[in-house]
Each structure stands twice: as C-alpha cells, then as structure tokens.
Image (cartoon, rainbow, N blue to C red):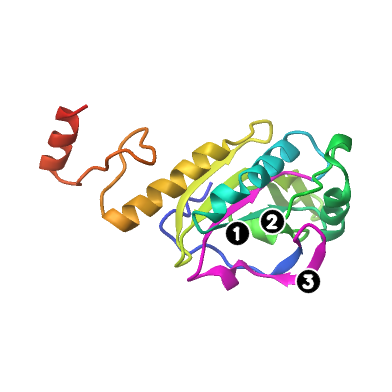
Amino acid sequence: MAVLVGKKAPLFEAPAVINGIDIEDKFSFEDYLGKKYIVLFFYPADFTFVCPTEIIAFQEHKADFEKRNVQVIGVSTDSQFSHWKWLQTEQKNGGIKGVTFPLIADQAKTISENYDVLAGGYEYSEDGELEFIGTPMAYRGLFLIDRDGIVQHQVVNNMPLGRSISETLRMVDALQFFEKNGEVCPADWHSGDKGLVATQEGIADYLSKK
C-alpha cells in the first residue's frame, strides 16, 4: 500500500455527478486547489450496505465541513449513470437522495490505482491472457489534501469497516490548528485543546500539565 502523505495528490479528470443531479463529463478537484481543503474518499460500490451509511453521514456533516472550508468528494468504480440513479433513489429504498457533494466515476479504475486503494489488479494468466485478480472495487480509502494539493492524512479500511466522520473532522481541525499556530497536536487532541511546541522543553511542559 503506497503512502501518499507528504506527496502531491494524484490529479485526475473523470465523469462525476455534482449537486446530486448534474452529470459533468470532466470533473477535476484541481479547480479547488489554492482555495479549499479536500477530503477525497473512496468507497466500494453503489447500491450496497455500508457505503450509503458513510455517504449520508458525510452529507449530514456538510455544514461542519463547509465552515472548515473543506470540499468532500466521493469516488467509486461505478459509472456516473449508476451514481445518478443511486442519487435519485430515496434513502428508505436504499438510495442516497439528498447527497449533494460530487461523486466521481472511476470505471477505468485508474484513480483508485493511482491512490493505491484498488482491491486487486490485472495480471497475465499462464495462457497469456490478461485478467483481473481480486475485487475490481476500491477499499475504503480517505485522503485529506491541503490547499497546496499535498496529502496530509490518509486511512484505508477494508470493505466491511465503515469510517468515522468525526475522526475526519478531527484531523481537519488538527491540520488547520498546526497551520495557524505552528504547534503540533498530541495524542487524542481535539479542537479547543492546547497544542504542543515541538521541542524538548515543549514536551516536558506539556507532560507536566497533563
């Protein structure tokens, strides 16, 4: 599994559904660089079970992300038409109607490969035929990208394991606190807590006040 933290986030152009209804042929998060932080998350598939709980939870916290100047973007290997249909389906019927952040269609699986979250890959068989080994879907990868396009945080879960939206917000707060104050964030830091000066004296002072 590649570690992208500290590196430029791989750029892409791909079809997407935006605003819950509009299909855009060439969506790129590059348009947000210099303006917004980005939470880019991958999920296995539309019309599944854990995935809608995560996607709807992100939507329910939309205001929390917006006040932090964060754009949330979802990605799966489904088509933009599958995304669109799922977005038009009522939540009581297993849909995600009401979700308004962009959902990216990665049918070619290149975005998932570039972020190294694809649960499988192409290999040649003994007969010389190219075949996909594994599952042609993405793991539950999540990447926090700063305004310069640098990955600052990543986490990858296996498909049965849903992610914590509150933890994602905590990491956004930690990054923005560090950028603003120049102090690092110790274990279990939350917004409103004091930071830590990254010196021997700073850690000694912090530990003495715990």
Q: In the rendered image, which quarter contains the C terminus?
A: top left
Residue wearing tag 1 = 114
Q: How far from the left and from the top, in percent, is residue 54?
A: 67, 39
Decide whether residue 30 is among the magenta residues.
yes
* Amino acid carrying mark 1 in the image: Asn
Point out the tag, 3 or 1, that comes first from the N-terminus. Answer: 3
Query: In which image quadrant can residue 105 be found?
Result: bottom right
Q: How far from the left and from the top, in percent, is residue 182?
A: 26, 54
Point out the tag, 2 or 3, that comes first from the N-terminus. Answer: 3
> Would residue 156 appear left or right of 139 to someone viewing this image?
left
Residue furthest left in the image: 201
Q: How far from the left and from the top, in percent, is residue 184?
A: 28, 46
Vertical order, 147 against 210 (above or below): below
Q: CA distance from mark 3 to mark 1?
A: 20 Å
Give the residue at x 33% y 57%: 179
* Amino acid carrying mark 3 in the image: Asp
What range of the chain is rendered magenta?
18-45
Q: CA distance from mark 2 to mark 3?
A: 16 Å
Decide whether residue 124 is among the magenta residues.
no
Point out the tag, 2 or 1, that comes first from the N-terminus. Answer: 2
* Amino acid carrying mark 2 in the image: Phe
User: Could you tell me if residue 20 is visible in this image?
Assistant: yes
Crowd class of label 2 (few under 14; some 14 to 19; many from 20; radius 10 Å) = some
Q: Are marks 2 and 3 in contact (CB under 8 Å)?
A: no
User: Could you tell me if residue 125 is visible in this image?
Assistant: no
Viewer-proximal residue among 87 and 150? 87
Vertical order, 156 against 148 (above or below): above
Per the rendering, the mark at residue 97 is none
Per the rendering, the mark at residue 25 is 3
Per the rendering, the mark at residue 101 is 2
Q: SS class of the residue under badge 1?
A: helix
